[in-house]
Image (tube, rainbow, N blue to C red):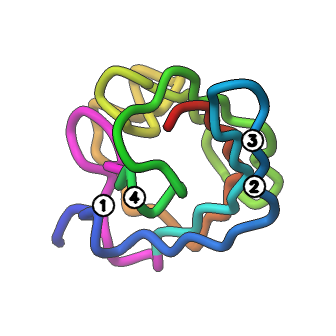
Amino acid sequence: MADIASSNVTYTKIRTWIAGKARHTVYTVAFGNATLTYPTGGVPLILASLGLKRYCDVLIVDSQATSAYTFKADVSGLKLIMETAAAEAANPAIAATTITVYSIGW
């Protein structure tokens, strides 16, 4: 089975606003189809797809309503990482998952 790549992630914008010198964005991020597996190191995200152009200072996982796994955000690597080390090590096939993320950057 192939790993989930950045091209396998779908972004749906919920809201964007500017506060001070930062762009705030809220997106739903959808990935997985039960045949793609969790990639070692996390599910890669794309900066521009999160409505940001230069950098991301804050990345927060806000809702994981459809996920069988718990994810946390890695702002430095711009990835979604599984919280459960055992599941991450096993590189499981990920069923359709939608996660809401909140980012701050520019």
**Residue at 28%, 46% in the rendered image:** 91
Mark 2, residue position: 16
Three-letter code for the amino acid on which mark 1 is drawn: Thr
| Mark nearer the viewer, 1 or 2 | 2
Mark 1, residue position: 37
**Residue at 57%, 23% in the rendered image:** 58
Viewer-nearest residue: 40 or 58:
58
Percent from the top left, x then y, of residue 95?
54, 69
**Residue at 58%, 35% in the rendered image:** 71
Mark 3 Cα-neighbour bin, 10 Å: few <14, some 14–19, many ≥20: few
Mark 3, residue position: 18
* Label at residue 48: 4
Q: Is residue 3 left or right of residue 13?
A: left
Give the distance between the C-alpha atoms of the residues marked 3 and 4, in whole angstroms: 16 Å
Which of disc 3 and disc 1 is earlier in sequence? Answer: 3
Give the vertical position of 32 relative to 33 (above or below).
Answer: above
Viewer-nearest residue: 77 or 17:
17
Give the distance between the C-alpha atoms of the residues marked 1 and 2, in whole angstroms: 31 Å
| Mark nearer the viewer, 3 or 4 | 3
Q: Find the magenta span and give its range.
A: 33-45
Contact (Cβ within 8 Å) of mark 3 with mark 2:
no
Percent from the top left, x then y, of residue 75?
43, 24
Give the distance between the C-alpha atoms of the residues marked 4 and 1, in whole angstroms: 24 Å
Which of disc 4 and disc 3 is earlier in sequence? Answer: 3
| Mark nearer the viewer, 3 or 2 | 3
Contact (Cβ within 8 Å) of mark 4 with mark 2:
no
Mark 4 Cα-neighbour bin, 10 Å: few <14, some 14–19, many ≥20: few
Percent from the top left, x then y, of residue 23?
64, 40
